[in-house]
Image: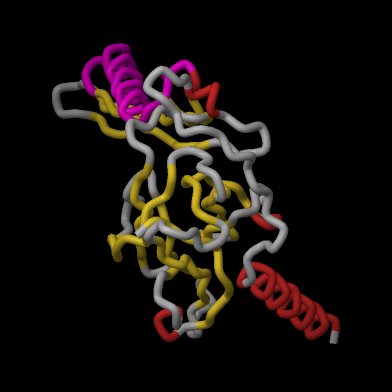
Amino acid sequence: MRLTCRLTGLAAAVAALTLTLITPASAAPVAAPVAAPTAASAPAERAVSSVGPVQLYIGGLGSGPYNIAVQSAVGTAADSAVAKGFDPARCNLVKGPTVVNQLPNGYVQVAVEYLCAGDPYTPGPTFMLNRYHKSSDTQSNSWYHPTGYQLQGPLGSLYTYAAPGTTPLYLCQVRGDHFTSTDVNCEGQQYVTRLGWLYTTQPAGVGTVQLLRCLRNENRQIFDSIQPNCEGQIHGGVLGYTLS
């Protein structure tokens, strides 16, 4: 009897969590509009305190004698951070140095992983939000192609700064399922990164598409869509409007 009660309670908790996540937060914080960044604008000048940071895990791999391999791995990670618009000084080592392979000549391959957080430099005013999928997860991402995922297609473009009438869009995670939200607190779930800014309402004179939160019937997996019928799945509400 106790086991039955526990299982019933667990099922109810999971159902309540699913219902909470399928409906985007209605009281999402809206960033105060700021002017578009100029070439001279520093990332810190564009940051808004109520806006969550961009957080990206950046790895590096090096080979050779151990000390040389470590230096190479760190250098590779620093180059990757710069390529993403981060000052390497804003990146902290979170994993490694780890020997991942012993080479036949006695040398080694070493891996490191850094977490870069803040507001990286972005060369353009917008970038594309793409949807990626693997068997157990679907995620929307504007920063990189997640390892092991297949590209499913674009979902419109996001602003790289807080344009008037926009709010930040975040990538979040619950268990192994990624989802997007306009809530900086990720609706009580795990924060991953900031993706960019999208319109809160459809603007006049600007080409946009409606970004919807959807839920798959067969496995309750959350995903984003720009199709009005959620591609035949469960409609979970409007997240906002991306640039078409």
Q: Is 4 placed above or below 117 here?
A: below
- Residue 101, position as x, y percentages in the image: 27, 33
**Furthest residue to the right?**
2
Q: Is 223 placed above or below 112 here?
A: below
Q: Nearer the viewer, residue 145 or 93?
A: 145
Q: Is residue 6 visible?
A: yes
Q: Residue at x 27, y 18 (%)?
A: 72
Magenta includes 80? yes
Q: Is residue 131 visible?
A: no
Q: Residue at x 51, y 33 (%)?
A: 35
Q: Residue at x 56, y 53 (%)?
A: 172
- Residue 196, position as x, y percentages in the image: 47, 45
Q: Which span of residues is magenta-colored?
A: 63-89
Q: How many marks?
A: 0
Q: Residue at x 45, y 83 (%)?
A: 229
Q: Nearer the viewer, residue 208 or 138?
A: 208
Q: Is 230 placed above or below 143 here?
A: below
Q: Quadrant of the C terminus?
A: bottom left
Question: Quadrant of the rendered structure where residue 20 is?
Answer: bottom right
Q: How is the image coloured?
A: secondary structure
Q: Nearer the viewer, residue 3 or 138?
A: 138
